Every structure is written in structure tokens, then in C-alpha cells.
Image (cartoon, coloured by chain):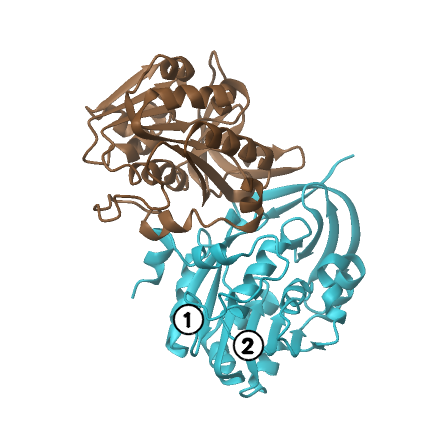
Chain colours: A brown, B cyan
Amino acid sequence: MDLWFTEFQTKNVGITLKTTRTLYHEQSEFQDIAIIDTVEFGRMLALDGLVQTTVRDEYIYHEMIAHVPLFTHPAPRRVLVVGGGDGGTIREVVKHPVLEEAVMVEIDGKVVEACRQFLPETSSSLSDPRVVLKIDDGIRHVKESETCYDVIIIDSSEPIGPGAGLFTRDFYQSVYRALKDDGLMVAQTESPFFNADLIRDVYRSMRDVFPIARVYMAPVPTYPGGLWTFTIGSKKYDPVAPPRVDAPLPATRYYNREVHAGSFMLPKLVADLLAP
Amino acid sequence: MDLWFTEFQTKNVGITLKTTRTLYHEQSEFQDIAIIDTVEFGRMLALDGLVQTTVRDEYIYHEMIAHVPLFTHPAPRRVLVVGGGDGGTIREVVKHPVLEEAVMVEIDGKVVEACRQFLPETSSSLSDPRVVLKIDDGIRHVKESETCYDVIIIDSSEPIGPGAGLFTRDFYQSVYRALKDDGLMVAQTESPFFNADLIRDVYRSMRDVFPIARVYMAPVPTYPGGLWTFTIGSKKYDPVAPPRVDAPLPATRYYNREVHAGSFMLPKLVADLLAP
């Protein structure tokens, strides 16, 4: 018998993955959580039926959401990750020796529990002594923080369900206040093929709130359209001309200096979205 | 009733597209040819069940396989396209005013006929007066050409079936001889996630045959993994430092100067493949 997991990325296009085992399947207070072994992409976390992370391709997303902002800031000592319950972003954040504290605020404790049990490659750095894990509402945590963080990473799920409030201009204003005077933020901002309006709106909001706003891209095979965007809002440092170009690189599989630069070189269809 | 087209990109992962109509479905001497209307990606050409081109995303592939080499050569007057039966590559080639003749050699006349009838947005430039269309074996045509072309574009299907002979070192040696003394070639070279060995082998072969070999990348949502590679072999001009940086750009939707540069900035997983 073959069991196939199919995510309908829109009403009219799906990705289908051959599976071998369902290791975990529970409804939390917030969402449907499943951890399933797929043949092609290894073990996968799906929330409400949407692929969040697979062992085979998660490194691209996690390296790019973490190292691009962290190599833009000259000394990212205090970092906040909002969301990111699988732990993959934290795993990349703790690779920076200058880091003193990484706070992770994930709203759904059951996601963290499931990933700790079944996705050790992704979640193991959650037990790093510099990591403070809070199961809480990231929006509230950010609102209650002031001039605290060097870098804030919004590693959210889709802009529906628990992630929706993380894509608003009000939230970016809270993030601005929670950052130190030379801080910067990054958010995952979906697919240029399927979410062009969202990318334009987020970019405009960040440009209103921060003196510097930039969009960069990376491929993620298991995400809709295979291509993903990230948007940076920064008070001082421009990610296109990062100060730490000479810093030693941690062990990575996707991120390097060339990709840092190249990921901001946007094709016309994305550049046009961001035109004034 | 819903009809879904599913391509199994490997044995264990598929893309599935909701369809509305099958406009054409025939077995040619070489392959199974289908033209199908999909809801998400518009009209699609599939060969042997594999997506070749959809109206919604074909421009990325066609612009990148054509304009990167054509803006690398200072005066691409004579251009050969091997394969490319849908006409999309030729559509981009004829946008260069310096072009005098574009020869297209496609092995399967039925593909050209079907695309002329059902994919006019892609195929219409096949009737440009500078285009010479030959229904013939591209390998033989290249073998019989000597010091003829400024740029040769290998717009092949997968390295199975009729396209297999286009991925060999012998073929690249024939291409070398068919190029003028400052000519260059490009070939589509599949996915870094699913065809890493092929990319490494093609790159090594081209590096043996040409003084300059380079790999670049572009996203294609309907291709396996969503990310595609192209490999250039060049006798004189380096695509990373193209001579025509000041030439006016034709109307494009993906290609621009930034993307030309950025597409050669390879992530570690691809750069490592190409290390000596």
C-alpha cells in the first residue's frame, strides 16, 4: 500500500509526497500537527496540512532566515525568534559565537514537543544554554519588549491561523521598538508567484517603519512555487553591504558570501513589485 | 468532474495540476505529446508526461537560457537553438536587434506543429524572417557545422529519450567546433536537488572542452525542485563579466542586469559540486 501526502498549495496545484510512516498527529489548541516520514524529503512537519519543514530541504530556509540578518549585524548578541517551533532557526542562530542570548517565543508548545521528540536534527539546539524558550504569544512578547534585541527573526507559518498577526504594520512597529538602536528584523514573506500582494504590502509597511527595507530570496523545493522571499527591516545596517563580510562562516550547506549578495539581486517580477 | 495532471518528478514526489481541457494528445515518432489547459499555470506542453512549458512560468526559463548567453556575447549575429520546439527560446533570441540569423533545429516536427497551433504566445516568433527552422537531428546538425555560430543554445528535454545525446562530452566537442572563435554555448542542466551528478558531469565536460565554464540558476515553479541550472561553455567571454552591460534591455519579465549577476552567485551545495 502506498500512502501519499498531498498539499494543495492553491486550489489548483498540489505537491504530493510518498510517505512511509505517520509518527505524530495531534490537534493542538492552535492547529493540526503532523510529523510524517516521506521517502523523497525525509521526515516532515506539517501544520494544518501545509509543509513547514522537511529534513532534506529545511537547511536552506533556516540558514537564509538566520545568517543573512546575523551577518548583517556587526555583533548579534541578543536575538529573538518569533515562531520557529521546529528549532531549525535557533540551530543556525547559535552558530554565531558572539551570541549571548537567543529568546524563542513559540505560541504552540505542542509543536516544540513534537519536534523535540521526532525531529532531533532540527530541534536539538533548543537545549543550548544560551537559548531561552518561551511558550507564549510572540506578538505580546514583542509588545512588552523595549530596546532589547539586536536581531528579531519572524519565523512564522502562513499568514492565516496563528501566524496572521505577524504580517501587519502594527506588529512591525512593535518590533521596531523592541529592537536596539541599530537593530534589524527579518520575516519570511511567502512566494513571489502566489503571494505577490503580500510581499508588496509587507515591504511597504517595513519601508514605512524602518529606514532600510530589503527583500531577498531563496529556493525551497517543498514550498509553493519552490521560491521563497524574506523581508528585512533595519535601523542602521544595510544587508546588501553587510559589515561582517570577513567574519568566519559557520558550517552551512546553502549559505555563503556569494549567496548573501546574490539573494538580493531580484528578478524583474519581484523588483517591479517593490517599485515606489 | 475534476481532472488532475500529475507528474511524478521522481518515484516519490509529484506535482499535480488541475486541468480544464486536453487540446492535443498524440504519439510522435519520438515521444508522447500533450497540450493541456491547467487552471494554475495556464496552457501546458508535456512530453512523455513531463511538464516542458506552461504559459504562466515559461518566461523565466526562456529568458534565462537566452539572454544570459546573448548578453555575454558582444554581437550575437548567428545563433543556433537545438531543441526548443515550443519556440519560447527563439522568441527571446529574436529580441536582440544585432541578430541576423537564428537557426532552430528541433528533432520532432509534431512538437512544433502542436505549439504553433495551441501555444501562440510561446511559438509566434518562429515565423520571424530571421528564423530558419529545421526539423532534424540537432546532434547531426552541430556535427556538420563548422565555425558558424556566435552562440549555441541547447534547449533540450530531459537527459532521457531524444535528449540523451545532448548531455555528452562528445557533443560539447562538436558544439565547440561549430562555434566561431569567440563563441559560447549554454545548455539547460536540470535540478541541483535531483540531478546533482548530471550537473557535476556536464560542468566537468564543458570545463575540459572550453576555457571558461560557468553554472547559473533560475527558479522554475513547475520543474522538479523548483530550481533549475544552466551551464555555459565559452571560448572567450566570461558570462560573469559580460561585455554588453550597457546594451539596452529588451522587454522581459524576469531577466535584468541584477539577475544576470546574481544567478552566478551559487549556494554552497552547488559550488561544492563544481569544486575541482
The answer, for residue A196, to whether it is visible in the render is yes
| Residue name at image x 52 percent, y 43 percent | A226
Q: Is residue A80 above or below residue A64?
A: above
In depth, the one of A124 and A107 nearer the eye is A107
In depth, the one of B276 and B150 nearer the eye is B150
Residues under numbered marks 2 and 1 in contact, where contact means CB atoms less than 8 Å apart:
no
- Measured as percent of width and height from the top left, residue B168 is found at 48, 73
The residue indicated by pointer 2 is B75
Q: Pointer 2: residues within 10 angstroms few (<14), some, or many (20+)?
A: some
In depth, the one of A138 and B170 nearer the eye is A138
Decide if residue A68 is on the left or right side of residue A167: left
Q: Is residue B173 above or below residue A232?
A: below
Q: Is residue A72 above or below residue B89?
A: above
| Residue name at image x 28 percent, y 33 percent | A93
* Amino acid at circle 1: Asp
- Measured as percent of width and height from the top left, residue B106 is found at 67, 72
- Measured as percent of width and height from the top left, residue B74 is found at 51, 75
Q: Secondary structure at mark 2?
A: loop
Question: Disc 2 to disc 1, how far (Cα)?
Answer: 14 Å
The residue indicated by pointer 1 is B238
Q: Quadrant of the N terminus of chain A?
A: top right
